[in-house]
Image (cartoon, rainbow, N blue to C red):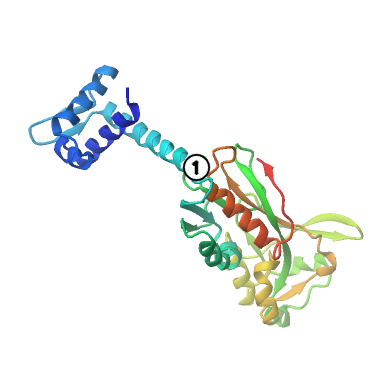
Amino acid sequence: MDLAGDLEVFTLVAEEGSFSAAGRRLRLAPSSVARVIDRIEARLGIRLLLRTTRSLVLTPEGLTYLSSARRILADLRETELSIADQGSPKGRLRLSMSQVFGRMFIVPLLRDFMQRYPDILLEVSSTDAVVDIAAGQADLAIRLGPLPDGPLTARKLGKTHKVIVASPHYLARRGMPTVPEDLHGHDCIAFSFKRAAPSWPFRKAGRDYVLPIKGRIETNNGETEGQLAAEGIGIARVCAETAQSAIDAGQLVPLLEDFNPGDGEEVHALFVGGTHTPARVRCFVDYLADRLKHSIPGTGSQNT
């Protein structure tokens, strides 16, 4: 019994809408295609297709079967590809990465990677939305910050650091804070993610503590946060690595560095690990770990 062959025939019939069209793609006679469908329905004891003289219509059970058939065939192709590409990585690699970090640190590395691995086709999605890798929405994701518990493999690529900044124009207008408590008299730009409390951490006399902050504007994007600060709207706590160019250009000024606790966000590559991890995923993660250690030091691996 060729179950995979049956699934492929059924899928093509559903997509093409006729036995003859599916037969042309499979190089089979329409009668042979019809016999395969009859065999599937007989095995299941249920009708999957309603046949008229002009068209084929999927029953509700047929729609369910089609969804499962597509998933099974995709898994089979992926398994065969993961085995076949052990020696030479190849195939489509779907990468999801945060907008700012990806633009600044990942995109500049892609040209060299593609030259090294000409048989890999990269599909890059730049978004701050969290994709479901386990559900097949991406092969690999680059994420910053704490990781939820789950079945995925996490490879640490490094750690970013935080810095408090404001524009020279804002400081000339509102004054320079010299201790963290001075922020109570300033407009602070807050991160609007639910996981982020409206407070910033500090270290004073060897003691770590958090200070509530307030302001009149919030954002869910780190790059926007830095831009708002550069426009003189308020004081922001941003990723030091992404803000460095604005600091070097004099658009932003670091503040309260003597009280910086040295915290930051770990950067991880997340993917489905184990023996079935395709070579193209493994080689890309290894490549990132090697290249990023120079700009965001600290590498390692763990499961999450």
Q: How many marks?
A: 1
Residue 212 x/y as whole percent? 74, 57
Most extreme residue toward the left is 53
Q: Which residue corresponds to the image point at 47% horizontal and 46% vertical from the top-left?
A: 137
* Residue 262 x/y as whole percent: 79, 60
Q: Is residue 98 left or right of residue 299?
A: left
Residue at image location 63% in from the left, 70% down from the top: 226
Q: Secondary structure at mark 1?
A: helix
Q: Is residue 17 left or right of residue 233?
A: left
Residue toward you, 84 or 148: 84
Q: Quadrant of residue 225?
A: bottom right
Q: Amino acid at mark 1?
A: Ser
Is residue 218 visible to the viewer in this orientation of the structure?
no
Report the front residue among 121 and 222. 121
Specify whether 299 is left or right of 20.
Answer: right
Residue located 45% across and 39% down the image: 80
- CA neighbours of label 1 inside 10 A, class few (<14), some (14 to 19), many (20+): many
**Residue 169 falls left or right of residue 24:** right
Q: In the rendered view of the protein, which quadrant contains the C terminus?
A: top right
| Residue sitting at x 70%, y 61% | 293
Res 41 → quadrant? top left
| Tag 1 residue | 82
Q: Quadrant of residue 56?
A: top left
Res 81 visible: yes
Along the line of sight, the residue nearer the viewer: 150 or 234: 150
Residue 200 place in picture, x, y as percent = 74, 59
